[in-house]
Amino acid sequence: MSVAYLGLGANLGDARQTLKDAVVCLAQQRTITVLAKSSLYRTAPVDAGGDDYFNCVVKIETSLPARQLLRLCHTVEEQFGRERPYRNAPRTLDLDILLYGDSSIDEADLIVPHPRLTERAFVLVPLVELDGELIIPQRGRADAFLGAVRDQRIEKVATCQCPMLAAQREDESSAPPTASNKPLCR
Ligand code: A4P
Ligand code: MG
């Protein structure tokens, strides 16, 4: 079994819902156990156009070798309607292998740790949320790179869009949540 971190991103269609569904899809794979999921973030496109992205990171345990995990990621992307008209095009779902144990892989179609991991707030912030002391092989602590990406816009958003949560936000300025109006979800 290996522990890996996957980055999820989307900015086409109902991107927020897609990320939630994609995490469920990953959790349903026999070869994957989802150990932890970061918050959901709304992020400005980096080196890309189109709408804002939604991004999150999941920590998984998997019986798959890295290459087979990449193949599974591509299969899941396809199931969510991923198309690749040009580089960094808006996408319904992108699944990247950020880290695979402490492996360093440098092959034509698989580079781990993900080569642009330390340059992107949309990856670093959720990674550090999951593990504040995370070490990136051959690069050191993940949180040491946060300062360099602080000008990239990233905002935590609620995973749940249920009416109860929306109502609570409207009420928050006037009355603090009570046991009766506190939502069960986050
Ligand atoms: N590939 C190599 N290594 C990996 C890896 N560790 N994980 C190869 C996944 N794939 C890897 O991937 C292109 C090729 O990378 C594949 O053939 C695969 O074998 P792709 O999924 O077609 O495209 P991609 O993931 O967009 O490519 P890339 O180069 O990884 O793009 P980036 O650098 O990840 O940028 N802004 C915001 N706010 N949020 C985003 O999610 N994403 C991008 C994509 C740009 N800007 C963004 C976001
Ligand atoms: Mg990708």
Image (tube, grey):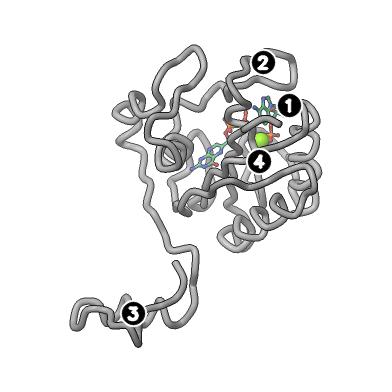
> Image point 46% across, 37% down: which residue?
127
Percent position of residue 46, x then y = 47, 37
Disc 4 within 8 angstroms of ligand 2 (CB): yes
Quadrant where the N terminus sits is top right
The circle on residue 95 is 4
The circle on residue 84 is none
Q: Is residue 114 above or below residue 182?
A: above
Displayed quadrant of residue 12: bottom right
Disc 3 or disc 4, which is closer to the eye? 3
**140 left or right, relative to 31:** left
| Kind of element beneath mark 4 | strand
> Image point 20% across, 83% down: which residue?
175
Looking at the image, do the residues carrying marks 1 and 2 touch, with CB atoms under 8 Å apart?
Answer: yes
Instruction: Determine which residue is flagged by label 3.
Output: 168
* 3D distance between C-alphas at marks 1 and 2: 9 Å
> Image point 39% across, 54% down: which residue?
156
* 3D distance between C-alphas at marks 1 and 4: 13 Å
| Kind of element beneath mark 2 | strand
Instruction: Determine which residue is flagged by label 2.
Output: 105
* 3D distance between C-alphas at marks 3 and 4: 33 Å
First of labels 3, 4 by sequence position: 4
Q: Decide: few, some or many residues near mark 4? Use Cα within 10 Å; few <14, some 14-19, many ≥20.
A: many
Instruction: Determine which residue is flagged by label 1.
Output: 66
Q: Amino acid at mark 3?
A: Gln
> Image point 22% across, 79% down: which residue?
176
First of labels 4, 2 by sequence position: 4
